[in-house]
Image (cartoon, rainbow, N blue to C red):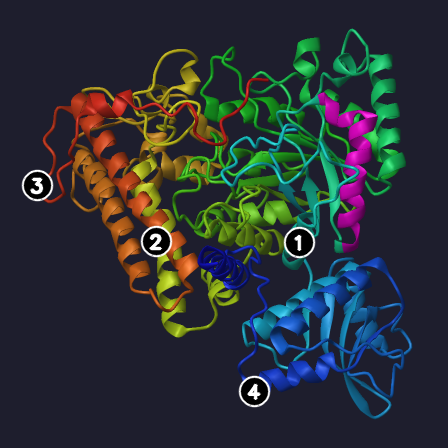
Amino acid sequence: MLKATLLSIFISISLFFSVSANDGYNLWLDYRPIQNPELKSQFKTLMDGIYFFGENPTYQAIKNELDLASDKMLNQAPVYTNERLSNSKIWMGTRDQLSQVLSLTQQGEISNLGQDGYWRGPLDFEGKTYYAIIGNKPVGVLYGVYNLLNSIQTKTFNKSIKITDSPKVKVRMLNHWDNLDRTVERGYAGFSIWDWHKLPGYVDPRYIDYARANASLGINAVSLTNVNANALILTTDFMKKAKVLADLFRPYGIKVFLTARFSAPIQIGGLKTADPLDPDVIKFWKEKTDEMYSYIPDFGGFLVKANSEGQPGPHEYGRNHAEGANMLADALAPHGGLLIWRAFVYSHEVDEDRHKQANLEFEPLDSKFKENVIIQVKNGAIDFQPREPFHPLFGAVNNTQLGMEFQITQEYLGQATQLVFLAPMWEEVLKSKTYQPNQNATVASVIETPINKNHKTLIAGVSNIGTDRNWTGHLFGQANWYAFGKLAWNPELDSKTIAEEWIKLTFGDNPDVLTKVEKIMLESHEAAVDYMTPLGLHHIMGRSHHYGPGPWVTGGRADWTSLYYHRADSLGIGFDRTSTGSNALAQYAPEITHNWSDPNEIPEKFLLWFHHLPWDFKLKNGMTLWEGIANHYDSGVKKAREMEKTWASLEGEIDPERFHHVEQLLAIQVEEAEWWRNSCLLYFQSISHLPFPNNIEQPVGDLEYYKSLSFPNAPGIRPSW
């Protein structure tokens, strides 16, 4: 009897904690109860009379969100009315639906907001004032509702102020590197959320929560599968599975894209070639694309990785990237689909600095791509390093639509064991001046500007979303998903604004929490760069798994080794990309080439990216290069420890489950920062033969031990193709 009683108590306690504990599943849509009486009254008034101008699946999605938000924030259900005038407090609908109650000025203002924009604020009609949320399309209303709920949560709502907003970029996409067996390449949050084996029969409720989260940020496209593609995703069976997801996402304004393996005509079409100019290949892709649209009428299009890292492409047939992309674009064009072709191309067979290879292939093809083709370019020319100068393609082509590819998953930035807020890195890239096509051009302006009215603009982010309860493995990985969505909507935003908003939505508005967490977030990226790859060092991580330091990696393909990039020898360190070296610097505008060719003028954060310099080269602070490298590594470790200490001071102010989750990971991060510092400095000292500066904490450990470490089961390793 006693055992049974104890078991009952244990189960009750377990159920209580499983329900009440905050495990991060709700992301920034937690909808905590409103404590402010005035704000609560204002929101309650709005929820007491909601009138929709018409019916639409997106309006039903809005109702579902309002039901959830009102229940959690007010502990009551919203009231929906069929009476537009007498009982309604808030109106929702499209500009066309409200045309009779809008002035011509208001109609024109809303019309200029485009398909995804929204207008919300007070609307006077027949002597009464209503609150209205209006879009040109239902999805605009949806975005306006999420913005309203955001303002309630962050206590910025003002019923008297009109708010208008619209995205600066048309296609705001998540790229999943998910495989059909549910493994995720470079994914650190569990398995893929797409359960292909159970689809189409079983629909995981998590899919809707995923759609809600993306819609709340304005993300309107998702590529479901790995760019290292499996042709099976284009078979009829998988089309039926993808259709289920497309149908679920449609009310939330999200279009489904799939990755297309260039050799699919051979692998699933029974052809002997995938030559893009072969009539049978053209026919295969047309028929396959038509079939796709028969299942998903608003299918977004294909994302393609070709002729890079062993992936098949048009080069096998003597064709160029434009010929390969345009063939697929032609198949998509009748349906309004997009062909997104990645610019991440390089080959060990090309005897050129890897930094140069994308430009060498795509610059000669400028203006050769069809209007429904977007070239998706990584933020830097190597591969999502902790810090990279912006990709030179963004200033090198003027007649080809370029889209941005950021990496939200932290492949080279601590994976899911380190807190690294990525918005400052992305902001740095977006605000970089390209000087082309004009003197005021920035990377952001290049991305935002369509070549002509028929071109679409794009920002994509490689996701780190998986089956972990908190979606991203590390709680603060959510902040990077959030920041990506915000910057995809408006690339001009600043990191501080985004961080403040995410903190309030995630932890509430406690001033002490806000100040301390914001400090951690905004300093975290620079700290990681310091203890990983300071002063322009790059690509010195472990081979294959990319977890941890590996400046000693050599053997095999040169451009997959660390020595290829840091080129450290007894005389100095760094990759000479000036005119005396690979001359990759010449791929940038003359203003950049001129300034950065001088090691005394280039921003020191890019110094060793473009220059091979002696160990005794003098930095701007008077230190030698060797002393500067050592001090940066040491500073990064100290910053990581400070982050840990700051977080520890928040115990009791943040719920225990999330506090201890982050606390444990910050302890790991400090250990990993020390690992990076110790192993890198010991390695570089073995080459420079210089003593460590006295002012730093002396590196400890044995270099041979660090070199012997192996991680064959690290998460996210690329599978064999």
For the stretch drawn in magenta, what is the main secondary structure?
helix
Q: Is residue 541 above or below residue 119?
A: above
Report the residue marked by disc 2. 663
Point out the tag, 4 or 1, that comes first from the N-terminus: 4
Q: CA separation, marks 3 and 2?
A: 31 Å
Q: Amino acid at mark 4?
A: Pro
Point out the tag, 2 or 4, that comes first from the N-terminus: 4
Point out the tag, 1 or 3, that comes first from the N-terminus: 1
Residue found at the very far bottom of the displayed protein: 127
Q: Is 235 included in the stretch rendered in magenta?
A: yes
Point out the tag, 4 or 3, that comes first from the N-terminus: 4
Q: Nearer the viewer, residue 526 or 446?
A: 526
Q: CA separation, marks 2 and 4?
A: 34 Å
Please give the range of residues in magenta. Answer: 231-251
Q: Position of residue 635 (x, y in %)?
A: 23, 46
Q: CA separation, marks 2 and 1?
A: 27 Å
Q: Residue 298 appears in which quarter of the rendering?
A: top right
Report the residue marked by disc 1. 209
Q: Amino acid at mark 2?
A: Glu
